[in-house]
Amino acid sequence: MSTDTTPDEPLPALLEQVKGITLAKLHRRLAATGFDGIAYRHGHVFRFIGEEGARITDLAARSGITKQGVGELVTELEQMGYVERTADPDDRRAKTVRLTARGVDAQASSRAILDEIDAEWSRTIGAHELRVLRTTLEAIVASEAPKPTST
């Protein structure tokens, strides 16, 4: 290799670029389909709200951000009509964050858009290469997952 060539981009930097490209496409397409206002930061909690809803404390644990941070994001999503806070049936002091009909539609649209992006990548690099990429990334994620401690 000659010394006048640019060194390869570090893999984490490439992954960060792919993430940025993907999120920009996702949010642009969401806005184009009527789901405006959803930003990258909202994904930290929005993606963890299932059919049964979730408590703020659970969203904080799953997203890795503070309860206060989650509360602020939930307030923003609530103001845009994507979520609502309801009384928790198991604990009167707690609130459950639930998707509204608009939130359910936005989640479904997000999933469909991400599937479209996968299909675009499949056409760009090939279906086999995309499967290999996915399998490789899943293996890296699994290898870095916290290991259970024995007591």
Image (spheres, rainbow, N blue to C red):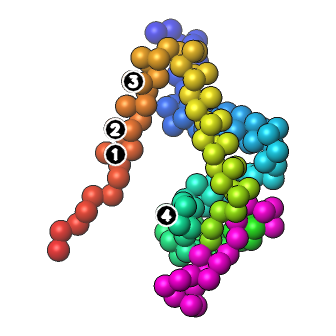
Q: How far, Cα to Cα, is label 1 from label 3?
A: 15 Å
Residue 82 image offset from top left, x and y in percent: 73, 60
Is residue 83 highlighted in magenta?
A: yes
Where disc 1 sits, the SS reads helix
Numbered disc total: 4
Q: How far, Cα to Cα, is label 1 from label 2?
A: 5 Å
Q: Is residue 64 visible?
A: no
Q: How far, Cα to Cα, is label 1 from label 4?
A: 16 Å
The answer to whether mark 2 and mark 4 are in CB contact below 8 A is no
* Residue at 53 percent of width and 83 percent of height: 89
Lower position in the chain sequence, tag 2 or tag 4: 4
* Residue at 69 percent of width and 39 percent of height: 26
Magenta region, residue range: 79-96
Q: Which residue is mark 2?
A: 139
The answer to whether mark 1 and mark 2 are in CB contact below 8 A is yes
Q: How far, Cα to Cα, is label 3 from label 2?
A: 10 Å
Q: Which residue is mark 4?
A: 62
Residue 142, label in figure: 1
Where disc 2 sits, the SS reads helix
Lower position in the chain sequence, tag 4 or tag 3: 4
Which amino acid lies under the numbered mark 2 shown in the image of this protein?
Ala
Residue 60 image offset from top left, x and y in percent: 54, 69
Q: Quadrant of residue 66?
A: bottom right
Question: Most extreme residue toward the top, as rendered?
Answer: 2
Callout 1 crowding tier (Cα within 10 Å): few <14, some 14–19, many ≥20: few
